[in-house]
Amino acid sequence: MKRRLIGVAAVLLVAMGVLLGKFGMPGLGSGDGGTGTANDSQTNVSVSPQRAEAPPAETPAQKTVPAVEQGAVVVRVRDQGFLVMGTSGSMTSATIEEIVERAQGTEPNSVGIRVCIRREASAKAGAWGKLVEQLKSVGVADDQIDWGNDQVP
């Protein structure tokens, strides 16, 4: 009897934790684990149908390139491969050797960066590691490689 009572109490506690979590309170639910500040909550904004307008399409000339990427070799790591940003702003496939060659021919930009590395969610650590290793072996210093906020949105 005592064992059954303990089991029922445990099940009820877990169920209560799940319910509390579902309503944004600390518990065992599927909440996002946020800090509880206003920035964690999602804001719902409704737009009346009469005023809904599509945002204007952004042309390549309107896109602003971050200062850290201006004049630098911008590399995106995808799976085991690499994409490099061309002069037109489009990404093309490249090998490590091609990236290293481009980096060697590039002077540091206004913020001292020669290579910007961005990783996609599918990027493999081995590919990224080999690229950094090769860049360092040809004289690209740590502070000339930018990987801050390197996850591709």
Image (cartoon, rainbow, N blue to C red):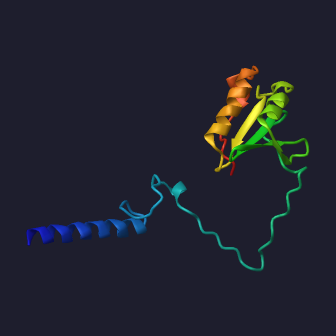
In the visual, does 65 lie left or right of 144?
right
Q: Quadrant of residue 46?
A: bottom right
Residue 148 visible at all: no
**Residue at coordinates 87% horizontally, 25% vertically from top-left?**
105
Vertically, is 93 above or below 129?
Answer: below
The residue sitting at the top extreme is 139
Q: Residue 62: x, y in percent?
A: 87, 51
Q: Residue 119: x, y in percent?
A: 68, 44
Q: Residue 149: x, y in percent?
A: 65, 41
In the visual, does 102 lie left or right of 39?
right
Q: Quadrant of the N terminus?
A: bottom left
Residue 77 visible at all: yes
Residue in front for this viewpoint, 70 or 78? 78
The residue sitting at the left extreme is 1
The residue sitting at the bottom extreme is 50
Q: Residue 79: x, y in percent?
A: 68, 47
Residue in front for this viewpoint, 72 or 57? 72
**Residue at coordinates 74% horizontally, 35% vertically from top-left?**
116
Residue in front for this viewpoint, 53 or 16? 16
**Residue at coordinates 71% horizontally, 78% vertically from top-left?**
48
In the visual, does 143 lie left or right of 70?
left
**Residue at coordinates 76% horizontally, 32% vertically from top-left?**
115
Q: Quadrant of residue 28?
A: bottom left
Q: How many marks?
A: 0
Vertically, is 100 above or below 75?
Answer: above
Residue in front for this viewpoint, 86 or 55? 86
